[in-house]
Image: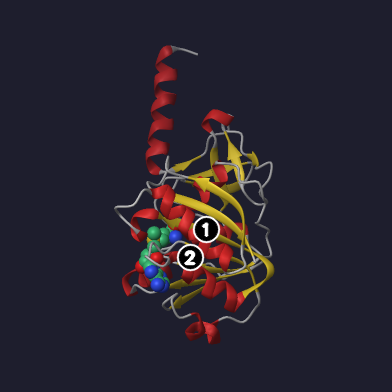
Amino acid sequence: MSLKIRVKLAEIVKIRKKRGNVELNAINIRNHPKFSNVYISGTPQNLKLYTKNLVLGQKVYGENLLSFKGEEFREWDPYRSKLAAMILDKPSLEFLSQDLKCLYLGASSGTTISHLSDIVCEGIIYGVEFAERSMRQLIQNTDKRKNIVPILGNANFPERYANSIFTPIDLVYQDVAQPNQAQIAIENCNYYLKNNGFLILAIKSQSIDSVQKSEKTYTQEKKILENAGYKIIDSINIHKYAANHIILTVQK
Ligand SMILES: C[S@@+](CC[C@H](N)C(=O)[O-])C[C@H]1O[C@@H](n2cnc3c(N)ncnc32)[C@H](O)[C@@H]1O
């Protein structure tokens, strides 16, 4: 191949990457070895995560869309989504499956919940968010996703959104960055989560105590969960992707 043609081809790839809709058969997208409906590419040192797009052609937060073997994948950015960061850090337990019924606390404008929606494609996610502006964005970004039920509500008062939740819950995911993170999780899990169901809890130490050492804050939050009868299965430090955060896998 002449140098001129090679330069031209490199330019085309660059333009497509810029558009964010990349068709590169050089990327080998394959199943994640552990998590159903999660996909990977690259080497273990440079692993990328993807989910299969439920809404073809639609991005939620500017993520790359890739076509591979006739299917469309959304690149899942661990710097934007703590669930992706956690999965990259190899949790010991597989807690996802395609028919899960989930309660998502702190849905914000839809970044992580949209990937969860790709994953639980035959399940349902109730997404609670108390900021009206974020809720408007959530609805705009996810209105074509039939498995997301947006709920404008305050996670401190789980009983107030009981009339919007129609199924027992298998998985609670919480990312609310509040001073009482563990307590909010316990109250929602006591109310909605099935026995033996799982809670995935993002803990941001700075929202609880900005002076105390993060490790001490994490220990305190874990104690609150254990004293309420919950079992901590995994504690994953995701500081590399999100400052002052750990993610816990907890079982009721
Ligand atoms: C860190 S952001 C969540 C990001 C989101 N989980 C994602 O990865 O796409 C925290 C969100 O929780 C919401 N939030 C905080 N406290 C809440 C509460 N008590 N009830 C409901 N939502 C709350 C905030 O408005 C904010 O949108």
Give the number of the disc on residue 182.
2
The correct choice, above or below, for 229 with respect to 59 in the image is below
Query: Is 187 displayed left or right of 139 in the figure?
Result: right
Specify the label residue 222 is tagged with: 1
Q: Where residue 191 sits: x, y (%)?
A: 58, 79
Q: Going from the N terminus, do you reach mark 1 or mark 2 first?
A: 2
Q: In the image, ligand 1 is in what quadrant?
A: bottom left
Quadrant of the rendered structure where residue 146 is? bottom right
Query: Residue at horizontal 43%, vertical 48%?
Result: 215
Q: Give the residue type at disc 2.
A: Ala
Location of residue 17 with respect to 169 vertically, above or below: above
Foreground mark, 1 or 2, reads: 1
Q: Is residue 16 left or right of residue 210?
A: right
Q: Is residue 111 visible?
A: no
The crowd level at tag 1 (other Cα within 10 Å; few <14, some 14-19, many 20+) is: many
Residue drawn at x 44%, y 18% as measured from the top left = 6
- Residue 234, given in percent of the width and then of the height, sits at 60, 50
Cβ–Cβ below 8 Å for labels 1 and 2? yes
| Helix, strand or loop at mark 2 | helix
- In this rendering, would 76 be left or right of 251? left
Q: Seen in the image, is 241 located left or right of residue 120?
A: left
Q: Nearer the viewer, residue 155 or 180?
A: 180
